[in-house]
Amino acid sequence: MSHISLPEGFPGITAGFAFRPETAKPMRELAHILLHEPNSLTPGERELIAAYVSAQNDCYFCHTSHGAAAACHLGSSEIVKQVKTDFETAPVSSKLKALLAIAGKVQQNGKNVTSSDIDRARRLGATDNEIHDTVLIAAAFSMYNRYVDGLATWQPHDETMYAQMGKHLAEEGYRKRPADQPEPEYYRTARATAENELAAETK
Amino acid sequence: MAYIRVPEELPGIRGLMAFRPETARPMNDFVETLLHAPHSLTPGERELIATYVSYLNDCYYCQTCHGYIAAACLDGDEDLVRRVKADFQHADISDKLKALLVIAGKVQKSGKSVTTEDVERARSLGATDLEIHDTVLIAAAFCMFNRYVDGLRTWQPHDEAMYRERGKRIARDGYVFISQEYLPAEAGAK
């Protein structure tokens, strides 16, 4: 059960967003610019950074949904799994490995990033903007992860739901779902599954 | 020197926001809503939460900047800000705010550290769902801002007078208004 009464049936951060639309708006906007808008790092690379930091923070909802978005962009869920487990041996560019190393330091504390971490990334072709965005993505997920877990939101273990969310995020991005657009079917399905499981357990 | 080349060698987060106005705009809107907009928690209380979390993260720029904004909101009581950072349980603040600071301190470590008992305690002292929500989100947000400011090794001058002066102005005018000083016009506009 979540720590406060959140609108029912919304998984993870979407519950916090539905509870407080005033803070949801800039939070969605920030994620949209950082992860979805055109940039020299591909959306797939940026989603990998988000998924990696969320995995380091052990936030199930975030690392699964952003992992699914990354898989959708990259056409491979295997790469996502490898990056989460050990990015240095994953089939990604050396530049991205250097950026993931920086993101991992930021996840612990901003002060852990060293000049040699930055030099390595720069030597492998990272620009100021890419270094900036890597640090900010890692910092932002240090926020999103704490928000999702700090409210003890509902985080269903439902592969299908995350796959569909990932596809939606990869295609549409993070800006607010229009008010006239209905709640996605996959939330309802995940909720029905959870209710059935609960009913089976309490029998 | 910062790890990236920021405009005009602006200090702390200001340099980073001037470097990337596209992300600065939602971040300023966000912090304006969290800390400055009308709320059942006073701006002083919310700034104390931001200051305390920044202190735990050992971010000099943020804890000093928000510490002086908090002081400006609290009739210039800089000593109270120092006592909240050092030992808030013995500071002259409400029991409700103490319970919220406990939650903020847990969030600073990990969202998962917050327990049902922490939340029950805050609620028994009068905290509403919105106040608990915003405490969690302020603490989480400063885990972002602190990492952003320190992760890019921004310039953080040790100049108390500068932070005090700025604190007064932000307390009065808010974040979005002040951001117009260092953001291009279209990005600084709401």
Image: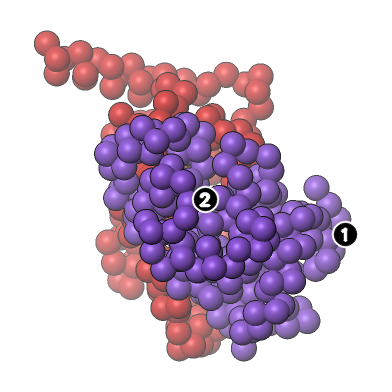
Q: Say if A126 sits above or below A76 in the image.
A: below
Real-space Cα distance between discs 2 and 1? 27 Å
Q: Residue A196 placed where, x, y %? A: 24, 15
Q: Residue B140 placed where, x, y %? A: 47, 53
Chain designation of label 2: B
The kind of residue on which mark 1 rests is: Ala
Question: Is A107 in front, or is B63?
Answer: B63
Residue B122 in sight:
yes
Can you name the residue that lies furthest to the right here? B185
Disc with the residue nearer the chain's start (2 vs 1): 2
Question: Is A79 in front, or is B47?
Answer: B47
Horizontal side, residue A143 vs residue B173: left or right: left
Q: Say if A114 sits above or below B185 in the image.
A: below
The kind of residue on which mark 2 rests is: Ile
Task: Name the tint of chain B in the rendering.
Answer: purple
Disc 1: which residue: B185
Disc 2: which residue: B138
Question: Is B126 in front, or is B92?
Answer: B92
